[in-house]
Amino acid sequence: MATVKVHPKYSAAITFQEITQTRTHPACFMPYTFAESQKLFIRAARSIAGGVNSGIRKLELPVPVYFTHGRGARLWDVDGNEYIDYQLGQGALLYGHAPAGLAAALGEQARRGTHWAAQSLLEIEVAERIQKLIPSAELVRFNNSATEVVGAALRLARAHTGRPLILKFEGHYHGWGDEGLVGFAPPADRWGPDDTPSQLHPSQGIIPEVPTKFVVARWNDPAHLRQRVKQYSGQIAAIIFEPVLCNTSCIAPCASLLETIRDLCDQESMLMIADETITGFRFGGAGAQGYLGFSSDLTILGKAVGGGTPFAALAGKARFMEKIIKGEIVHAGTLNGNPLCLAASKWSLDYVLEHMKEHPGRINKLGQSLMRSLEDCARRHHIPLHPQGPGLVFHTTMLKPGAPPGPINDYRDYVRRHDAPRWAHLRRYLLEEGVRAIERGLWFVSMAHTDQDLAETLPRMERAFALHAQTWQAPA
C-alpha cells in the first residue's frame, strides 16, 4: 500500500487507508462524518500533486477537510458539519471568518481593479497605519507572503553589514524557503551537541551551501546564545527569531532573553529581526514588541496584516532600509502592493485601531478561560494534556508516559516530552465533535469569538475527551 509523506516537522507517515477509513464511534450520538471530503480528496489527487497545496494539510485525519464557508468563529464543510474554529487559517484570521466590513472592502476594490503593478493611495494608507501601530516601523515594504519577507530581510541584513551568517533558533520557523527552514525540526538523532545545534535542513533540493550560512542556537538559554555569538564574532549579520515561539509548541522567551538579543545585536552591530508573522497584531496593535517590551531593527509581518489575503510586510528602522532605497539590493515582485490585498489590510488595521482599548485583553481572557477548561476536562478524564502559552495563542502539550509536567522550555524539551501520536488521536475526536484546532496542537482565539462560542465548545470537548480516554492505546 502506498504511503503518503507528511510535513517534515512530523516523523509519522499516513497510509491512504488510514486517511479514508471511518472509525466506529462508541456512543449513542453521531459524530461528524466526511464522505464528501473523502470523495473530493480522491478526486484532487488526480490533478493536484499529493491532493493538497501545502504538505502539512495531509496531516488532518480522517481526511483533509474541504470547506464551503465561514462566519465569525464558525466554519462549515462540504458534508454540512459546523465547527467552532480555533485554527483560523493558521492564525491569519484574527478578525474571524468573513467579517462583513472586510468583504465589503474587497468587493469595492474588486470592482475598481484587482491588479495594476503600479502605485495606489492604498499602499500609502496601509504603510501609514503600520507606522502608527508599530513604533519600530519607520519604513515599510510589501510582499505577498511572510516567506518572501524573510528572504528580503536576510538579504538586507547581509547587505547592510557585509557579513555572511545569520543566527536563528532551533525549532523556529521562518517560512518554507531554503533559508527559513535551517535547523527547524531536526530529529533527535541528528540534533547535534547541546552547544552546537545542527544546521540540518528538512527538505531535499536546497542549495547545499545555504545551511552553512547559519548559526543555530537553542531558545531560552541566554548564556548559550552569548557563547554562539562570541564563537562567530564579526561574522553574523542578524539574529532572527519568533518573539514567542509558536511554530513548535508555544514557548515565551525567558526573562532575560530578548534583552540579551538586543544587547548582543547592539554590541556586535547585528540586526535584530523579529518574525512577527504570527504575533503581529494578535498580541496587540504593536505586536509582540509592544506586548513584551522590545524594539527590533526589522520586523516581518504576515497573516493578520492581510486579514486572510496573501499579503505581508517588511517594516524597519529607516537606516536599515537604506540599501533598498538606493537600489543596492533587489526587492521586487509583480504583485507587491496588490490593491485587493491592500484593501483587506487597510480594513484589518483599522479594525485593530478601532478596538485598541479591548485588544488584546479580551481575546487573551477568552483564551485563558479555554485553557483552564481544557486542563480541567483533561484532569477529569485522566489525560496528561497541559495547555501552555498566553490566551492569545497556546499549545496543548500531551505528555509522554513518565514525562515530567511543567512548562516546555525549548524545541528539544518539546520533542522529549510531547506525545504527538496521542495528541493526533485526541485531535481527531475533537474534529469529529466540531472543535477544530491545528494538527500540531496550536489553538488561536479570534476577535470574533464570544463567550457563547466557548460555552458551546465545552460539551463538545467533554465528549471528545471521554471518547479519547476510552479508546486510546499506546503503540506497542
Image (cartoon, rainbow, N blue to C red):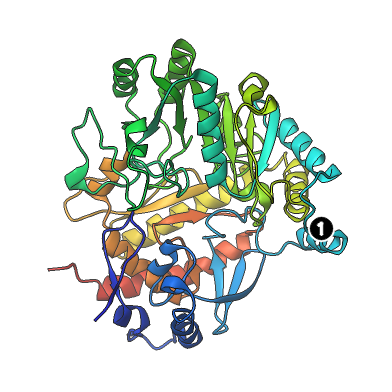
Mark 1 crowd level (few <14, some 14–19, many ≥20, 10 Å Cα): some
User: Residue placed at 23% from the left, 49% from the top?
Assistant: 187
Relative horizontal placement of residue 193, taking residue 255 as reference (left or right): left
Between 104 and 71, the residue placed more toward the observer is: 104
Please identify the residue farthest to the left as the structure is shown: 476
Residue 349: image quadrant is top right
- Where residue 130 appears, as percent x and y from the top left, is 72, 36
Relative horizontal placement of residue 215, taking residue 163 as reference (left or right): left
Classify mark 1: helix, strand or loop.
helix
Relative horizontal placement of residue 306, taking residue 263 as reference (left or right): right
Q: Amino acid at mark 1?
A: Ala
For the N terminus, the quadrant is bottom left
Q: Which residue is mark 1?
A: 105
- Where residue 270 appears, as percent x and y from the top left, is 47, 19
Between 332 and 248, the residue placed more toward the observer is: 332
User: Residue placed at 35% from the left, 15% from the top?
Assistant: 233
User: Residue placed at 50% from the left, 32% from the top?
Assistant: 154
Relative horizontal placement of residue 438, taking residue 131 as reference (left or right): left
User: Residue placed at 73% from the left, 49% from the top?
Assistant: 345
Residue 313: image quadrant is top right
Residue 314: image quadrant is top right
**Rendered position, 435 above or below 161:** below
For the C terminus, the quadrant is bottom left
- Where residue 116 appears, as percent x and y from the top left, is 80, 53
Between 460 and 121, the residue placed more toward the observer is: 121
- Where residue 367 appears, as percent x and y from the top left, is 53, 51
Residue 306 appears anywhere in the view:
yes
